[in-house]
Amino acid sequence: MTGMEQSDQAECVSGVLLDEAALTLDELARACAVEPEWVVQRVRTGMLLDGASAEMTGWRFTSIDLVRARRLRQVECDFDANDDVAALVVDLSEEIRRLRDKLRIASHL
């Protein structure tokens, strides 16, 4: 691999996705600095894009998928966790966030 190819692969996509916008498999992988196969494995196990069809060409990822994928990758890297443990940690942290939001809303009523 040449230096140029390595720098292209290391390039990270950042920004804010609107609900109407969506990333392809390759774009999501690039945004998370992972190989597309990493994303495919997590979609097939239901960790990402829940209820996706088997046809990868139709997969489109929203900003919610992007955030979840980045969290999964972060937990895997930071704690040397396998993908099942990372999914559990991310699921629990998302649930905590939802409960805190409900509590905050309820306290303002």
Image (cartoon, grey):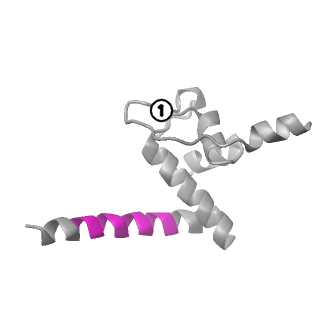
Q: Is residue 44 above or below residue 96?
A: above
Residue 70 placement: quadrant: bottom right
Q: Residue at x 64, y 64 (%)?
A: 76
Location of residue 38 in the rendering, given as x and y in whole percent from the top left corner: 67, 48
Q: What residue type is labelled 1?
A: Ala
Q: Quadrant of the C terminus?
A: bottom left
Q: In which quarter of the image is residue 77?
A: bottom right
Mark 1 — residue? 22
Quadrant the N terminus occupies: top right
**SS state under label 1:** loop
Q: Can residue 33 be seen from the camera position used here? A: yes
> On the picture, is 11 further left or further right than 32?
right
For the stretch drawn in magenta, the main secondary structure is: helix
Q: Is residue 50 visible?
A: no
Q: Position of residue 44 (x, y in %)?
A: 58, 46
Q: Which residue is drawn at 69% across and 48% down?
A: 34
Residue 92 lies in the magenta stretch: yes
**Neighbourhood count class around disc 1 (C-alpha, 10 Å): few under 14, some 14–19, many 20 upward:** some
| Magenta stretch in the rendered image | 89-102
- At a point 14% along the width and 72% down the height, the residue shown is 107
